[in-house]
Each structure stands twice: as structure tokens, then as C-alpha cells.
Amino acid sequence: MNTTGTNLDTVRRNNLATVLGLVHRGGPAARSSLTHATGLNRSTVGALVAELVELGLVTEREPETSNRVGRPSPVVVADSRVVAVAVNPEIDAVTVGIVGLDGVVHRRVRFPLDHVPGAEEAATVAAAVIDGLRPDLSAATRVVGIGVAVPGLVRESDGVVRLAPHLEWRDEPFAAELAEATGLSVSAANDANLGANAERLFGAGRGASDLVYLNGGASGIGAGVIVGGVSLTGVSGYAGELGHTLVNTNGIRCHCGAVGCLETEVNQRALLAALGLETADGEELDGALAAAVERGDTAVLAEIERQLGFLAIALRNATNVFNPELVVLGGFLGALFAVAPERLILLVSREALAASGEHLRIARAELGANILMIGAAELALAPLLAAPAD
């Protein structure tokens, strides 16, 4: 039996991936739109869609009524019953989500902890939460696997967490442990890199091929970089650690061992202290900052200005090195930007090279609490999207 593929086989497989990718990223699309987007003829697109339907990856529905002459083109929709499981271990919780092939988060469960979990414990907790979601998963036609967003350095080849300082993990085979506990295939990557990809595909970065994403949370500042539409990961998957770039030569020593890192100067803890709060979720922080600015709270205004100044230095460096069209700020950095957007833009424009920053835009992340669920799910869905027929 001849098992060697032909050029036609390769073209068909690539075209299947192209069509599935379009409806996955762009949402429901008429066959006519897919024909236009791919440059293929109508019969070829029809055959590709029919194959994707047979594979259980897309469905077709009748379009809404229109005034156009002729038979309306059927609308192709990514099947939401094809799902990925997303996992995000944090210093105070393990969050698990179910995300459809259509990019919609069906469920998100945050399991709080009163201590920093070890890798084995986090895998056990995640597996228990996934087990509790079995009724939701039973409604799926296919579970492609698990994607894990880790706040640390993850080796791309095998999902080993080389260093997650806030979790106090070092060389932990977390992906393998979770796979053994669940029986599902597991892929893991840095949370900020996954967040950057999620915002590029479904959030504030839609349409941007070159962007820098920075997220601020209780664990520090993570960053992901997209260059030419591709995530910049480095040789082993550790690229993009802008949270550990130098912003203050007279700063304090960071847990990483260096002095004056961005996350030692720009952090949620100092912002909450100025507000007189111990903890706050995203909406609470937004409200507290807006109220403090409105009443002219000098301590809060001074802390905002101080943090914006150091953040601008980091963004200057990112702008000069990567020349992005867009910087997306998530977590508490998004809240910080929201209360003084013009100020941050002014500071960055003053610091960055004029040519590098002349087309730069800064925006707040749009995906909110779902960003890492969507990003981790994309990691799990990647093999399917690349080769739907396999």
C-alpha cells in the first residue's frame, strides 16, 4: 500500500487548515466570504467545508435574510462542541476552564488556595476540578487536550517548568504530572506569551501582526511579544521576560537576583497599599483607582505617577527593540493605564526613538479574566488547527 502523500494531498490539508483557521479566529463566515478570503473557487471551498463538517469541526447554518439577489451562501461556524481544557496555576488558586473551538469560554472555575501550591498539588487540584467538570465535558463531541498557562519559564519541548519563582517551582514536569492525573494530552507555556496570542486573535490586538503584551498580577509582570504574527519564544521558549528588564539602577534586588527590575518598581502590592486595600479583583481595582483620582488623593496620584514613569521606561525599551504597532496592557497595568492613558502615551513618546514609536498605539487588554483560558486553549487546539484531517 502506498502511504506517500502527494502534492495534492498536501494542498488539500493546508486548505483545510486555512478554512478552519478563518472560522475559528474570525467567527461565523459565509461560504462566499471564505471563497473571497482564500482565493479558492466556490466548488473547492464547498468540498473543504463538507470535509470539515464530516470531521465534526464545523457546522453550517442558513444565513439571516438579506436583500441580495440570488441564493444566500450558507454560514460556516466552528463547532463549539469541540473543546479544549485550560489550566492556570497561580500563587493563590488553580483556575480551570472549558473553551470551545469557536473561542468561547463555556466554563471557568477558580479553586482558591490559602497557600502557594507545589507542582504536584496543583496537578492534583486541576485534575479534581476537571473531574468535577465531566458533565460539561460529556456534552462535547471532542476534547482535544489540556493547555496550561504557567507564570514562569516553561521548556517548549516537554512542558517542564524550569522556573516559576512566585510559585517556587524549579524543573517541575508539571505537564507530565497533569497528563498522568487526567489521561489527557497536555501542553504548557508561559502565561504571558499565551495571553499575548489570545489578545492578538480575539482581543485588542486583532489585526495586529507586531505587538507587545504586558500583564500585571499578584505574581508580578509577564510579557509576550508577537513579531510578524508569530510568538517570539526564543530557542527554548523563555523569551519576552520584560518584567525583568532594568528600569531603576538604584532599585531594590528582585527575587530573580538582579537589581531594579520592572516588577520591583511597578507592582500591584504598592498600588493596593496606596489605596489602603489588601486585595482587589479587576473591577474593584478599577473603581478604587478611579475614585481616588476623582477626589484628588495625593498619595494615590503620586504612586500612579511613579509607576507610570517606570512602566514608560520598559515600554521605551520594548518599542526601541521590537518596533511594535501596538502595546496591550492587562491586569493591574490595564487599570493603571485606564486612569491616565494620555500620561503614559506622553511618557513613552518622550522616551522612545521617534522613528520606532511614531506608529505605536497603547491599548488595554479586552479579554479580561478569560484571557489565560483562551490563550491556554489555543495551545491545546494548535495541533488540530494545523492539521484538521489528522
Image: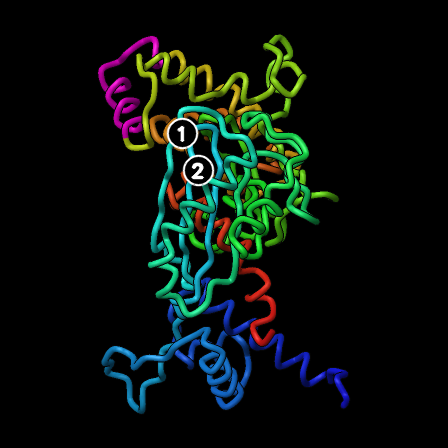
Image coords of residue 70 (percent x, y): 31, 91
Circles 1 and 2 in contact, beta carbons < 8 Å? yes
User: Callout 2, which amino acid?
Assistant: Val
Q: Amino acid at mark 1?
A: Leu
Q: Residues within 10 Å of mark 2 (few under 14, many from 20)?
A: many
Residue 371: which quarter of the image? top left
Which quadrant of the figure contains the N terminus? bottom right
Q: Is residue 351 visible?
A: no
Q: Which mark is residue 136?
A: none
Q: Is residue 332 visible?
A: yes
Residue displayed at 51% across by 26% down? 220
Find residue 251 and report its horizontal and vertical position in percent: 59, 10
Neighbours of disc 1 within 10 Å: few (<14), some (14-19), many (20+): some
Taking 301 as reference, is 321 above or below it?
below
Q: Of the two numbered discs 1 and 2 on the same chain, state the one appearing first in sequence.
A: 2
Quarter of the picture containing the C terminus is bottom right
| Relative horizontal placement of residue 213, taking residue 227 as reference (left or right) | left
Give the label on residue 113, or none.
1
Look at the image and give the residue range highlighted in magenta.
284-301
Predominant secondary structure in magenta?
helix
Asked whether 84 or 182 is in front, the reply is: 182
Q: Quadrant of residue 115?
A: top left
